[in-house]
Amino acid sequence: MATLLRKIGLIRLHDRDTDGAKHQGSRKASKKNGGKQCNASSNEGILLQSDHHHHHYHSSSNSHHQQLPHSHKRCEQPSSKDASKDKQQPQQQTGNKVPPGGSSSGSVPGQPPNKQHCAQVRSRRLMKELQDIRKLTDHFISVDLVEDNLFEWNVKLLQVDKDSALWQDMKETNTESILLNLNFPDNFPFSPPFMRVLSPRLENGYVLDGGAICMELLTPRGWSSAYTVEAVMRQFAASLVKGQGRICRKVGKTKKAFTRKEAEATFKSLVKTHEKYGWVTPPVSDG
């Protein structure tokens, strides 16, 4: 009996120990799983926080990058006042030298930009004029350079209207031609040449004291850069006939030569007079 009771007690102790071990194993498993869940939840919280922080940083960085170009543009783009000052500076610098008849507010149409360009234009134009005159078949005029100076010509007018009194005077006095002097300014062909009669001494025919010639196209107002020397000479020949020009045969006056100084003074005076009262120039068809 005692032995039976002892066995029963041992069995109960074994069962109690087994149940306790199982209970302790289940508690350890639950603790382990609970720890994992806590770690997982804590990791998720950390990830959520990091994602939130990263999203916040990314959005703030994007906004910062979007604002950078505007601030950069502000640094690069000058204000309207500065831009207007920059535009006015070249005008003020170039406005010191004002071309004749112009203003400093802008460029004047028809004016050469500088002396170097003007000299090139004048030389090319006069060389072409010489070539064209030498190609004339009617021998209307001939040209000689004064001391090989391209910018000063002596031009011989060889023909006028053969029905005119001037032509008869030329035949009777054995005058082969009417000699003229042409001086081309620096800004030719944008300004007219100064033209005057050298010989013979003429009366009327719009030829005045000193050999000055009264023609509107020889003035800055009446001149055009399209006019050629040939065209000017043909107009002058027509003016001589229209104005009833004659070779002077009076005693004493025939020996007095025309001078440039007198011609320039006379030309300035007649320009002022005609600018006040107007010009009358005969057309070529009337010659």
Image (tube, grey):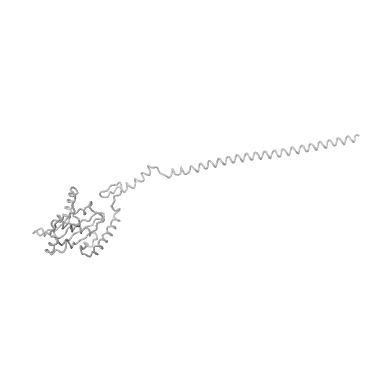
Please indicate whether residue 226 sits to the left or right of residue 77 in the image: left
Residue at the limit of the structure toward the front, as seen here: 285
Q: Nearer the viewer, residue 280 or 272?
A: 280
Where residue 140 appears, as percent x and y from the top left, is: 20, 63
Q: In this view, does 256 lie above or below 37?
A: below
x then y, percent, for residue 43: 64, 40
| Left or right position of 27 against 105 | right
Where residue 61 appears, as percent x and y from the top left, is 52, 42
Q: Picture coordinates of residue 26 (x, y %)?
A: 75, 38
Q: Look at the image and tell me in which quarter the N terminus lies.
A: top right
Q: How many marks?
A: 0
**Image check: 137 left or right of 91?**
left
Quadrant of the image for the C terminus? Answer: bottom left
* Up/down of 11 relative to 189, above or below: above
Does 197 sit above or below residue 97?
below
> In front: 233, or 251?
233
